[in-house]
Image (cartoon, rainbow, N blue to C red):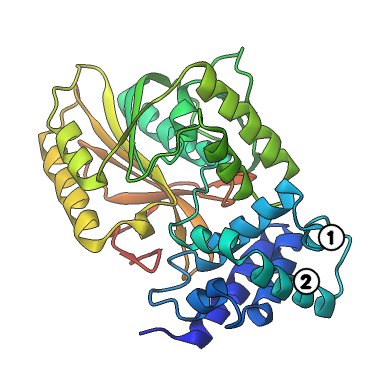
Amino acid sequence: MADETANRDSFRIQADYCRAMAAPTTARVCTALVEAVDRESATGRRVLDWPGEPVADALALRLVGGLHALHRAGIDPPLSTVFSGAETDPARVIAILRATLRTQDAVLLPWLDGPPQTNEAGRSAGLMTGLLQLAARYGPAFEVLEIGSSAGLNLLIDRYRFDLGGAMAGPDESPVTIRPEWRGVAAPGARVVIRSTRGVDIQPVDLAAPKAAMRLEAYVWVDAAERQARLAAAISMVRERGVDLVRGDAADWVEARLAEPQAAGVTRVLMHSVVWQYLPPAGRARIRAAMAAAGERATVERPLGWVMMEPNRDLHRHEVRVQGWPGAAGMELVALTHAHGAWVEALPPPYETRDYVMRRGAYE
């Protein structure tokens, strides 16, 4: 059943996240939408009558993505005064957004149809931090399997250059260097050699299509100039030499990949970032079961790893967790990270270990 109050509150919650991540303009838009959304447009009615869990469904980000796309297209000048930061008066911002929801209703409504494709290359910093942990245990060679790959930007993890607090990884000649602010203990001084990357998504983004790329760019917050530049470079890398990305169900795909022969001396790794909350409970259970079964078969010659960067919404933070087989430890919390990879805080051992069951995006 729809809960109009909860649906409006989801925009307040998103505004808090935006402020915490130094995105004041996007926070201002989210705050104004709490009041700007009304029943005078099909878009507004759908937001207010949203039947699901609005925070987990990223309802606010769906609508903000559509509004940002309008700004980028330059077809709604009053809206652009909000996104450019020229208009900051709260009452005026609310009035402008309310008018846009009505005049651009047909354009905005489809943005609510699916979750935002927030594919962010910077998240590879957290994922690489996890791979370094596994490399220190099992050796440098990896076969990477990613679920929820979106446009495949993190499948470029073998082509990016990383500087993780002085720990270097990736090719020197890469056009994209990912250099987050490094906090905490030093990253493991291990070598990483990624032999292959493959990914799956229920609705992959084809970056060869200009409209698809424009949609992806719209989900990058207007405040984040560095992210926008990095995204443009990553899109060029995918267009120059594609990635192995297929359409499919994550659980089906994981089960099939884990059943394939594994090369000796190569660690097979399942990785994902900000996707677990979007999977259905049955799918999550199947993936956990498949990984546990494959973990029982893992050997020192053919290890198995799991690296995830997922939000813990109860604690309002993003966490990098790692599990490896063979090994007695469970899923270990090895680092905290900014949602878009602006910083990584590596944690010292002994690592916190707990079950990896998700509830509203939090680990229990």
Image point (18%, 43%), residue name: 252
Q: Amino acid at mark 2?
A: Ile
Check residue 96 in the rendering and tell me which mark sits there, or answer none. 2
Q: Which residue is mark 1?
A: 81
Residues packed near mark 2 inside 10 Å, few (<14), some (14 to 19) or many (20 plus): many
**Relative image position of residue 350 (x, y in whole percent):** 40, 50
Residue 164 placement: quadrant: top right
In the foreground, 262 or 59 = 59
In the image, is 179 to the left or to the right of 256?
A: right
In the foreground, 145 or 241 = 241
In the foreground, 220 or 205 = 205
* In the depicted structure, whether residue 46 falls above or below residue 273: below
**Relative image position of residue 70 (x, y in whole percent):** 68, 54
Q: Is residue 121 visible?
A: no
* In the depicted structure, whether residue 226 falls above or below residue 315: above
* In the depicted structure, whether residue 55 falls above or below residue 167: below
